[in-house]
């Protein structure tokens, strides 16, 4: 068995991806649909608060793009409030579920970094700190595409983890044995987990070796965090003329961290 134990290069890609691995996609959908869980989408009360926050900054009837829409939990609520909604996600299971639920929302199965949706939008949203899962290069590519797709005065609304994330995370190793299967596999498995911190680059890497009877699968998940000054500078460089920061929108999180800030960037 080939187990990967070294610290990954910055934003190194792994052979397997938790968002596209077929079995894990199903488990992700289950977590998305659990109204008490923050494991994939945030819990239902937090989702409603975020939708309320969005409504404070835009008007019904506009064209809205939801990047990383999952099974459409935000898209459905916003469509019901009068928005014209397009959603994109590369979790095929979640997109298929979303399409089955609503025929009046346009859903795309794809990678929004490399397959950014064509069209013009009045607002683009990206929720649950997805911006931090991408390298700085991919982030900047995405921001250019978002800016180019927005109408004049259009807004990007998203959230990122703050520097306080370092109080919730620490480097270390762990292992977990599941004799009857679980989130990572339907069969017996051992999961070797490692957390690495890159303080100069303001990010964490979560590395996983999934050991099943006949195979080892290697996964890396990245989590970038930002200061207010840094994220404002990045957005200004991408062409956004007005940026406002909104901390402490939510009450708590039972899965990762509540140290996030919401950002509204206007073209």
Image (spheres, rainbow, N blue to C red):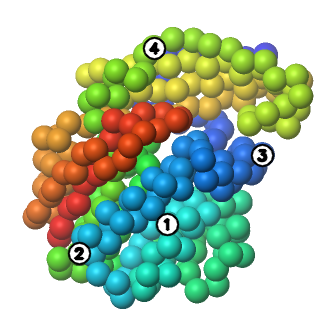
The secondary structure type at the circle numbered 1 is helix
Return the residue at label 2: 154
CA gap, disc 1 to disc 4?
A: 33 Å
Say how many tags the image has.
4
Q: Is residue 187 left or right of residue 239?
A: right
Distance, label 2 to label 4, CA atoms, is: 40 Å
The image quarter in which residue 236 lies:
bottom left
Q: Is residue 114 visible?
A: no
Left or right side of 172 for 148: left
Residue at the spot of label 4? 171
Residue 110, x across and y down, in percent = 57, 64
Which residue is tagged 1? 74
Residue drawn at (17%, 41%) of the image? 228
Label 2 or label 4, whichever comes before in sequence order: 2
- The tag earlier along the polypeptide, 2 or 1, is 1
Q: Determine the CA span between mark 2 and mark 1.
A: 19 Å
Cα distance in 3D space between marks 3 and 1: 24 Å
Q: Position of residue 189 (x, y in %)?
A: 82, 24
Of the numbered discs 4 and 3, the one sitting upstream in the chain is 3
Mark closer to the chain start, 3 or 2: 3
Neighbours of disc 4 within 10 Å: few (<14), some (14-19), many (20+): few
| 182 is higher (above) or lower (below) than 244 | above
Residue corresponding to mark 3 = 23
Of the 4 image quadrants, the one containing the N terminus is top right
| Cβ–Cβ under 8 Å for marks 3 and 2 | no
Binning the other alpha carbons within 10 Å of mark 2 as few (below 14), some (14 to 19) or many (20 upward) gives: many
Secondary structure category for the residue under label 4? loop
Estimate the x, y position of residue 122 in percent, counting from the top left. Answer: 30, 79
Q: Residue at the spot x=71%, y=60% of the render?
A: 93
Whether tag 2 and tag 1 are in contact, CB under 8 A, the answer is no
């Amino acid at each position: 068995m080939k187990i990967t134990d070294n610290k990954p290069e910055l934003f190194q890609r792994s052979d397997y991806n938790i968002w596209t691995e077929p079995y894990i996609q199903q488990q992700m959908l289950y977590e998305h649909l659990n109204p008490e869980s923050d494991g994939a989408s945030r819990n239902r009360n937090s989702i409603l608060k975020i939708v309320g926050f969005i409504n404070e900054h835009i008007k019904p009837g506009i064209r809205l793009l939801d990047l990383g829409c999952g099974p459409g939990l935000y898209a459905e609520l916003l469509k019901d409030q009068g928005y014209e909604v397009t959603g994109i996600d590369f979790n095929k299971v979640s997109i298929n579920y979303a399409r089955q639920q609503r025929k009046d929302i346009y859903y795309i199965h794809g990678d929004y970094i490399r397959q950014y949706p064509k069209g013009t939008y009045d607002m683009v949203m990206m929720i649950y700190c997805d911006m931090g899962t991408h390298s700085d290069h991919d982030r900047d590519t995405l921001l250019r595409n978002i800016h180019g797709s927005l109408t004049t005065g259009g807004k990007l609304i998203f959230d990122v983890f703050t520097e306080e994330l370092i109080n919730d995370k620490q480097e270390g190793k762990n292992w977990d044995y599941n004799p009857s299967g679980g989130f990572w596999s339907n069969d017996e498995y051992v999961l070797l987990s490692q957390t690495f911190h890159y303080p100069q680059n303001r990010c964490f890497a979560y590395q996983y070796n999934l050991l099943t009877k006949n195979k080892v699968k290697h996964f890396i998940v990245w989590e970038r965090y930002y200061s207010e000054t840094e994220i404002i500078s990045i957005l200004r460089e991408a062409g956004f003329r007005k940026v406002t920061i909104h901390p402490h929108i939510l009450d708590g999180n039972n899965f990762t961290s509540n140290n996030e800030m919401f950002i509204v960037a206007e073209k």
